[in-house]
């Protein structure tokens, strides 16, 4: 199984196994207020692209995306199977360090 990476600002980055990364892209595609962000996240998820670079977005889209990513722990707690929380929650918690 491969890895997916999000490149943030200020030399920050986050990576996770592809399954969690694709789930995250799908959540971004469902939840973002920006049509551009939703489109690119969906395109990456559908094509199996294993990276997302915040530099591809406007500063306001980057701010919104970072805020959305930081909420993913709570989203995953509700949506992902509880038996995997010991793996997914700590990994998603790392998104709070992404800028």
Image (cartoon, rainbow, N blue to C red):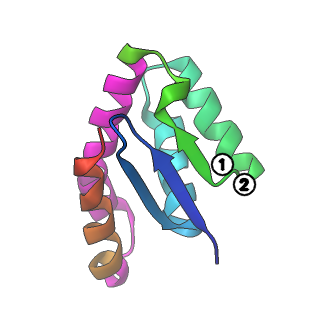
Q: Secondary structure at mark 1?
A: helix
- Residue hosting label 2: 48
Q: CA distance from mark 2 to mark 1?
A: 5 Å
Q: Does 36 appear above or below 8?
A: above
Magenta highlight: main SS: helix
75 displayed left or right of 16? left
Give residue 91's position: percent from left, percent from top: 32, 67
| CA neighbours of label 1 inside 10 A, class few (<14), some (14 to 19), many (20+) | many
Q: Residue at x 56, y 59 (%)?
A: 4
Which residue, as the protein is rendered here, is positioned at the far bottom? Answer: 83
Q: Is residue 34 above or below residue 75?
A: above
Location of the C terminus by quadrant is: top left
The answer to which of 58 and 34 lies nearer the viewer is 58
- The residue located at (56%, 26%) in the rendering is 56
Labels 2 and 1 touching (C-beta < 8 A)? yes
Q: Quadrant of residue 67?
A: top left
Image quarter hosting the N terminus: bottom right
Q: In the picture provided, is 55 more to the left or to the right than 78?
A: right
Decide: few, some or many residues near mark 2? Use Cα within 10 Å; few <14, some 14-19, many ≥20.
few
How many numbered tags mark residues here?
2
Residue 28 counted in the magenta span: no
Q: Position of residue 31 (x, y in %)?
A: 43, 34
Instruction: Determine whether 85 is above or below 3 in the image.
Output: below
Give the residues drawn in magenta, as a range: 61-84
Disc sitting over residue 45 in the figure: 1
Task: Name the disc covering residue 18, or none.
Answer: none
Q: Nearer the viewer, residue 66 or 14?
A: 14
Element under label 2?
loop
- Is 46 displayed left or right of 41 in the figure? right
x%, y% of residue 81? Answer: 38, 75
Question: Is 76 one of the magenta-colored residues?
Answer: yes
């Amino acid at each position: 199984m491969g890895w997916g990476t999000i490149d943030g600002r200020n030399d920050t980055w986050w990576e996770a196994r592809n399954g969690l990364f694709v789930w995250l892209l799908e959540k971004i595609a469902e939840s973002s207020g920006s049509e551009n962000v939703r489109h690119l996240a969906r395109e990456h998820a559908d094509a199996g692209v294993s990276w997302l670079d915040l530099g591809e977005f406007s500063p306001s889209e980057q701010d919104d995306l970072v805020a959305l990513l930081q909420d993913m722990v709570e989203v995953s707690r509700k949506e992902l199977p509880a038996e995997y929380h010991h793996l997914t929650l700590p990994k998603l918690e790392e998104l709070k360090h992404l800028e």
